[in-house]
């Protein structure tokens, strides 16, 4: 598809526009809710704007994954589940339109109502809503799901539940959540918890479910077959209760979704080339250009599609765990970022085709601006000036190598920073601190991650010239999940995606509480009063200007904190797929994100 057909981000201003809908008097029950203002789609909308309401049903799609799985319960901290399950096999009270920054529409709930200043939210269930076994969804199921996930489920569900003062049935089909905090986003988050069947878990331990104990959901797909560590099959339910809802029209078109697991990326790619898989996301621009000329592409049986987006870059790179004393000093982290020869590595890995991530919200209006902080951004940061790393207020940009493979000037700058931090090189060429401890750390990788392995091999050789030893350790999927969940690593690959409407989830990413919560996204272990204060400003912004300033200030705190060695960004998605697989011409502003592949794709043979 021609990227030029991707229209401008017309909704970007809406994410931060001030509107009466965020506060004031209680509203009447309505079909949808937006973080700011009114939802873009009217009550009588036909379908989501990026879905094809006339798409045919049928066909199959087969994805490849590396690693494995040891649970099919995606809602607990225990084990590794296929990440797709919680998006494909389960539903919430409301569903998200990915063509708006943050708006929800009724799914299991037919309507939503909010109290004054969104101090409470009430949902009315659809009478026709059913679980995949045909049993009705009840208010009791909703209340049990929220409490169980909020106490026994994965930590990502705990933060919301801790801000619920009361959850209660207010009628046969209505449930109300009253909040402890003054946070208007909670009314939306309340609509996004998965709803599970209470009766299924009577007498069972939800948090310790066996592999064959698959939670019942209400979604169009359910797990119908699996082999541990090998594959998972999801099948479309022909009796799915919500197939005629406007929100579902043109979605969930494929009869079968198959997830095949492989030991490494090479085996996965060969399986795609041979036709065992019929869709593949390519994350390397050089590989996209150089290795997608195999026979199926030349015959036209495989199509190369580029899907643009305008969401923030998020952060992808190698994270340093500041819980380890070796990474506690910002000068050490800056030295390691400086020693990372991104320009040469990018040329080796992608032919220099992919730009570097420059901050957590880069590629969007929410990103920090270059140079010194000004206006409200400076005002928000000023009270914490003495505790912030250099560059947060003055302006920070990632170091750039000298353009050579050896990067001598970069290594000299890195060595000077390490000397300043008390890590000096002895006669034996080993860098040690004042206690004589050598500078040595472990780089934890997931088995099969060949790109990360290649990058780390190059990086380790550069660090060796600084007197630093790196032990590169690759572990299987289960061990990797266990260790990263418990923050048991020195340095490891890291990825956090960020939306056009950052909100309460930022606490789970960057707060001090998250640093102590296994399973949170605060892998770096940052503890920043400035970040926490800025998140509160973000959540309670009273104007577009305040929201932008708070987000840009947070971006400065994160980036100048020097927690991650950033890699290249993906400002487009590259998807190779069978020519019989199709997607709509109209694309959501989030691009290839949740709700796009396979959600709005369909199968139709090309003649």
Image (spheres, rainbow, N blue to C red):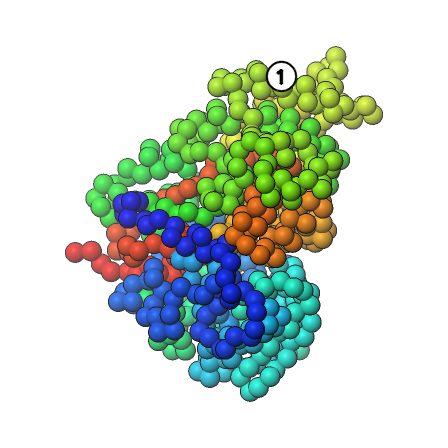
Q: Secondary structure at mark 1?
A: helix
Q: Is residue 274 left or right of residue 36?
A: left
Q: Residue at x 64, y 42 (%)?
A: 379
Q: Position of residue 302 (x, y in %)?
A: 27, 47
Q: Position of residue 141 (x, y in %)?
A: 58, 78
Q: Is residue 121 above or below residue 357?
A: below
Asked if residue 474 shows in the view, the reply is no
Q: Is residue 385 left or right of residue 67?
A: right
Q: Residue at x 72, y 46 (%)?
A: 529
- Most distant residue in the left direction: 607
Q: Position of residue 127 (x, y in %)?
A: 46, 84
> What residue is pinned by disc 1?
412
Q: Position of residue 515 (x, y in %)?
A: 70, 49
Q: Is residue 212 above or below residue 491?
A: below
Q: Quadrant of the C terminus?
A: bottom left
> Which of 94 and 279 lies nearest the eye of the viewer?
94
- Most distant residue in the right direction: 435
Q: Residue at x 74, y 25 (%)?
A: 421
Graded by Cα atoms within 10 Å as few (under 14), some (14 to 19) or many (20 or more), the crowding at tag 1 reads some
Q: Is residue 563 above or below residue 547?
A: above
> Which of 605 and 548 lies nearest the eye of the viewer?
548
Q: Residue at x 74, y 12 (%)?
A: 427
> Which of 4 and 120 lies nearest the eye of the viewer?
120
């Amino acid at each position: 598809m021609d990227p030029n057909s991707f229209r401008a981000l017309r909704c970007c201003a809406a994410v931060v526009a001030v509107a009466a809908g965020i506060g004031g008097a209680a509203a009447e029950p309505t079909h949808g809710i937006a973080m700011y203002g009114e939802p873009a789609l009217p009550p009588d909308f036909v379908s989501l704007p990026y879905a094809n309401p006339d798409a045919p049903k049928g066909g199959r799609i087969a994805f490849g994954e590396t690693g494995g799985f040891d649970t099919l319960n995606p809602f607990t901290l225990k084990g590794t589940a296929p990440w797709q399950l919680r998006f494909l096999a389960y539903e919430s009270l409301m569903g998200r339109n990915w063509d708006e920054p943050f708006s929800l529409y009724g799914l299991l709930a037919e309507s939503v109502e909010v109290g004054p200043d969104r101090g409470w939210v009430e949902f009315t269930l659809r009478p026709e809503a059913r679980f995949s076994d045909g049993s009705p969804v009840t208010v009791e199921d909703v209340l049990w799901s929220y409490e169980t996930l909020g106490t026994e489920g994965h930590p990502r569900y705990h933060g919301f539940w801790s801000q619920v003062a009361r959850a209660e049935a207010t009628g046969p089909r209505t449930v109300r959540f009253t909040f402890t905090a003054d946070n208007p986003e909670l009314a939306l988050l309340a609509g996004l918890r998965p709803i599970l069947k209470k009766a299924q878990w009577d007498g069972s331990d939800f948090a310790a479910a066996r592999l064959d104990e698959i939670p019942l959901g209400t979604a169009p797909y359910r797990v119908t077959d699996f082999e541990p560590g090998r594959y998972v099959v999801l099948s479309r339910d022909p009796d799915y209760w919500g197939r005629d809802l406007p929100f579902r029209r043109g979605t969930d078109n494929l009869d079968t979704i198959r997830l095949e697991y492989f030991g490494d990326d090479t085996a996965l790619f060969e399986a795609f080339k041979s036709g065992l898989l019929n869709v593949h996301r390519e994350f390397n621009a050089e590989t996209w250009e150089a290795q997608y000329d195999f026979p199926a592409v030349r015959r036209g049986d495989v199509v190369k599609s580029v899907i643009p987006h305008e969401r923030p870059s998020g952060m992808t790179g190698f994270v340093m765990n500041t819980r380890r004393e070796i990474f506690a000093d910002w000068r050490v982290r800056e030295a390691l970022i400086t020693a990372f020869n991104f320009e040469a590595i990018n040329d080796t890995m992608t032919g220099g085709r992919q730009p570097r991530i420059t901050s957590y919200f880069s590629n969007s209006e929410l990103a920090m601006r270059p140079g010194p902080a000004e206006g409200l951004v400076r005002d928000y940061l000023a009270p914490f000036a003495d505790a912030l790393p250099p560059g947060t207020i003055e302006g920070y940009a990632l170091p750039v190598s000298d353009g050579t493979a050896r990067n001598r000037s970069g290594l000299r700058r890195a060595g000077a920073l390490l000397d300043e931090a008390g890590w000096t090189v002895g006669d034996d060429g080993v860098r040690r601190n004042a206690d004589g401890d050598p500078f040595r750390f472990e780089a934890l990788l997931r088995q099969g991650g060949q790109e990360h392995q290649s990058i780390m091999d190059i990086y380790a050789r550069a660090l060796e010239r600084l007197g630093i030893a790196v032990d590169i350790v690759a572990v299987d999927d289960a061990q990797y999940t266990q260790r990263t969940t418990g923050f048991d690593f020195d340095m490891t690959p890291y990825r956090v995606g960020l939306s056009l409407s950052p909100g309460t989830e930022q606490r789970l990413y960057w707060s001090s509480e998250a640093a102590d919560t296994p399973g949170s996204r605060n892998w770096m272990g940052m503890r920043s009063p400035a970040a926490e204060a800025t998140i509160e400003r973000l959540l309670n912004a009273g104007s577009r200007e305040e929201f932008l300033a708070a987000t840009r200030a947070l971006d400065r705190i994160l980036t100048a904190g020097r927690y991650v060695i950033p890699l290249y960004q993906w400002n487009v998605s590259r998807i190779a797929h069978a020519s019989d697989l199709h997607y709509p011409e109209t694309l959501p502003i989030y691009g290839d994100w949740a709700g796009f592949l396979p959600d709005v794709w369909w199968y139709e043979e090309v003649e």
